[in-house]
């Protein structure tokens, strides 16, 4: 079956070409991604990624910020949702499933005690909940298969779901 590049607005030939290249030369799959964050005063900062406009970050006023942008833990939820959206678009296209609409709702529970230095413990999310809403003519079985494929291959989902060594050096 030939997949049109117009299905779900995905240039699937590019993805297939990369997969073929990695099959031929497995080292091509070893990639490094980076970001640079600059503090802008108070709780404001900006992340610069590749050549894109900086992404603002701030804390809500209730946490001492000026609320000029989403805070880092909100951005983490956004990163997971964006990664899942890419996975649904790519895998639906490969499977020949047309997506009319896709929305992903994410929320998480975070206790501020550790962040504020009030006690030891986990400063991060205790739980993240994700609800995926897909509008498509695909069958329930096709959507379940798509869902399993996406969650089993999500780089951000995998990163959040396991212990990842993080080295933070002061230079």
Image (cartoon, rainbow, N blue to C red):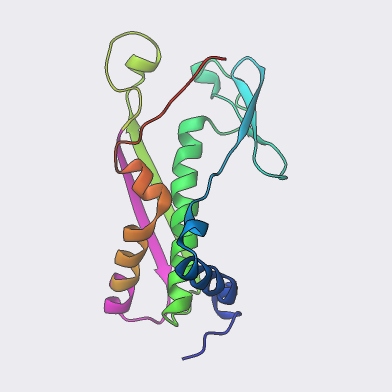
Q: Quadrant of residue 92?
A: bottom left
Q: Nearer the viewer, residue 2 or 42?
A: 2
Q: Quadrant of the C terminus?
A: top right
Coordinates of residue 101 in the picture (x, y in percent): 49, 69
Q: Is residue 163 left or right of residue 23?
A: left
- Vertical position of residue 135 compared to residue 106: above or below: below
User: Which residue is at 47% across, 54% downward?
Assistant: 83
Coordinates of residue 167 in the picture (x, y in percent): 43, 25
User: Which residue is at 35% across, 36% downward?
Assistant: 164
Does the magenta segment cover residue 131? yes
User: Which residue is at 55% across, 44% downward?
Assistant: 33
Coordinates of residue 148 in the picture (x, y in percent): 29, 65
Q: Nearer the viewer, residue 150 or 62?
A: 150
Q: Nearer the viewer, residue 151 or 18?
A: 18
- Vertical position of residue 3 compared to residue 54: above or below: below
Q: Quadrant of residue 51?
A: top right
Magenta stretch, residue numbers:
126-144
Q: Quadrant of residue 67?
A: top right
Does the magenta segment cover residue 113? no
């Amino acid at each position: 079956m030939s997949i049109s590049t117009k299905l779900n607005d995905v240039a699937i030939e590019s993805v297939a070409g990369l997969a073929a290249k990695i099959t031929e030369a497995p080292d091509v799959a070893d990639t490094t991604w980076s970001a640079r964050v600059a503090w802008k005063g108070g709780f404001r900062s900006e992340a610069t990624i590749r050549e894109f406009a900086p992404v603002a970050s701030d804390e809500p006023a209730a946490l001492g910020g000026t609320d000029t942008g989403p805070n880092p833990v909100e951005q983490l939820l956004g990163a997971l949702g964006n990664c899942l959206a890419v996975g649904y678009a790519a895998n639906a296209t490969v499977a020949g499933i047309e997506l009319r609409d896709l929305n992903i709702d994410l929320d998480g529970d975070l206790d501020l005690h550790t962040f504020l230095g009030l006690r030891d413990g986990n400063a991060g999310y205790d739980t993240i909940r994700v609800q995926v809403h897909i509008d498509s003519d695909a069958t329930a079985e096709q959507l379940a298969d798509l869902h399993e494929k996406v969650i089993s291959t999500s780089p951000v989902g995998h990163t959040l779901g396991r212990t990842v060594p993080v080295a933070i050096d002061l230079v």
